[in-house]
Amino acid sequence: MSHYLSKKMVLSTVTACCFTLAGCASAPQPTASPANTTNANTVGAEGIAFKQNDGFQLPAYQKQVLDNGFTPYLLPQHEVPLLSIEVLVGAGAVQDQQGGEAFLTSQSLLLGAGGKSKQQLEQQTDFIGASLVTSNDKEASYLNMTFMQKDTAAMLDLLAAVLRQPEFNPEEFTKLHARLVAQQQQAKESPRNVISRYFDSLLYGNHPYAKPTTGTEQSLAALNLADVSHFYQRHYQPDNIAIAVAGDFDIAELSAMLAGRFASWHGASVSTSELREVSKPATARVLLVDKPDATETTLMIGGVGVSQNNPDYVGLEVVNTILGGRFTSWLNDELRVNSGLTYGARSGFSSLSAGGAFQISTFTKTETTRQTIELALATYRRLWQQGIDQATLDSAKAYVKGQFPPNYETNNQLADLLVSMHLHQLDNGFINNFEHKVDSLTLADTERLINQYFPQQQLQFVLIGKASELNELAQSLGEVSTVAITDNGFSSNE
């Protein structure tokens, strides 16, 4: 599980895809500063960013909603003359109808906009040392900008053009599409890059979360410019967009600048049905992905996890830190340090709005796959058989608290945090009460969390490796489906 909330909070094996226009905006980012006063219009933390008694507090910010539904979050930070903007569009892979529309649309936004070509957009951002990046995940699409304070007006003009007037140039689209399809085909050359996609397809089944963020090789290749335009028209509307700005600005001035560029934008996004909760699998299953030339096995074990707004999220963070969330975790100690079976083993919860997954992941030589899985499962069972002692709990608490504040030091991190809170409908208490929840966690709490949330039965396994060497082992773990890694997609049903 990540030690912080952001759109990148999934495990490192789950990779967001992005397209970038970047100059040299690499100046140091500001740290969260004291918010000395809080006025009646401010939604945010009272007091300072680092408070001796209460720990880290979210700096003060203001939320606005324009008449068209466009929702800005404004968080001033004046230490350095830089701004970061994070735009969230409520449309991710779960809205895909064919597969890959959200991904391809986000990547196509920078192919020209507002009468400027792709090259002109790149030249503008390069000349002023700014950056402009688009990306997507399962539940949303994003646009990130970083720039100097003096360039605010110009970059807001560019942002308005990209969001409101993308041109989807056919010639540029053809080149981009071909490159992305080739990248999709190449991705499977590294099992660690794609194992989480196989795991999602196995665990989530017919739930929309099973959809890969980038589509499949064939679904992405089948998309065309009309599909991108259709997805854009359905979802890139003001009532479906939130924007977070963190950095050196005056709230009143920036509010007027945003209203001047977005208040006149009219349109409504298509209504989407609320995602149903993720259901637990009825049986233990194994997805065996055959890579005949493999000399090692990449594996993932797990089950259903929790949603991002689960009230026990913080406690689970602490418990998972002990199991597999840091270098000195049980899993890494047993599989890497003590036995030398792998270079690393970890576990975590990847949490979404309507549920999520719990995963143990590692890799090992083909001939030590059985030993590695058996040791990983034996280590995992220690949660129930041995439990957690006070010294271990205290160590994990200190680690989690130490990792927490640095995750919200920069403008980018703060802007990312605000749109993530918007997406998951979290209030300031998620951040402001985090350290208190860590401190108040007891041994009895950890026992309850382990029994309630860590999947113990009907575990799901993904093994990527040489199937002829792994089939007997797979059969002993659960109901087996076998696919070739060269097959389209990430499941046995593609």
Image (cartoon, rainbow, N blue to C red):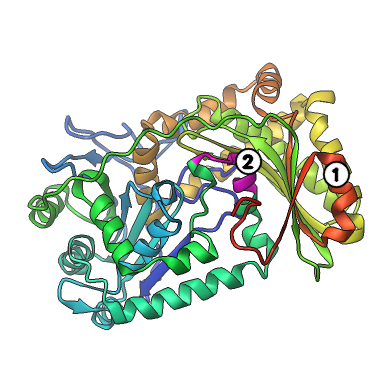
Nearer to the camera, 368 or 183 = 183
- Let me know if residue 142 is in the magenta part: no
Q: Name the amino acid type tagged 1.
A: Gln
For disc 1, the neighbor class at 10 Å (few under 14, some 14 to 19, many from 20) is: some
The C terminus is located in which quarter? bottom right
| Residue that numbered label 2 is attached to | 203
**Label pair 2/1, CB-CB below 8 angstroms:** no
Tag on residue 431?
none
Q: Element type at marker 2? A: helix
**Residue at the image position 45 percent from the left and 52 percent from the top:** 137
**Residue at the image position 43 percent from the left and 55 percent from the top:** 98
Q: Is residue 491 visible?
A: yes
Q: Name the amino acid type tagged 2.
A: Leu
| Residue that numbered label 1 is attached to | 475
Q: Element type at marker 1? A: helix
- Which span is picked out in magenta? 199-207
The rendered magenta stretch, by its main secondary structure, is classed as helix
Q: Is residue 237 left or right of residue 454?
A: left
**Residue at the image position 44 percent from the left and 67 percent from the top:** 222
Q: CA distance from mark 2 to mark 1?
A: 18 Å
Q: Where does residue 264 sit, x and y in percent of width and height?
A: 7, 52
Q: Earlier in the sequence, mark 2 or mark 1?
A: 2
For disc 2, the neighbor class at 10 Å (few under 14, some 14 to 19, many from 20) is: many
Q: Is residue 75 visible?
A: no
Nearer to the camera, 94 or 397 = 94
Q: Where does residue 459 sit, x and y in percent of width and height?
A: 74, 35
The N terminus is located in which quarter? top right
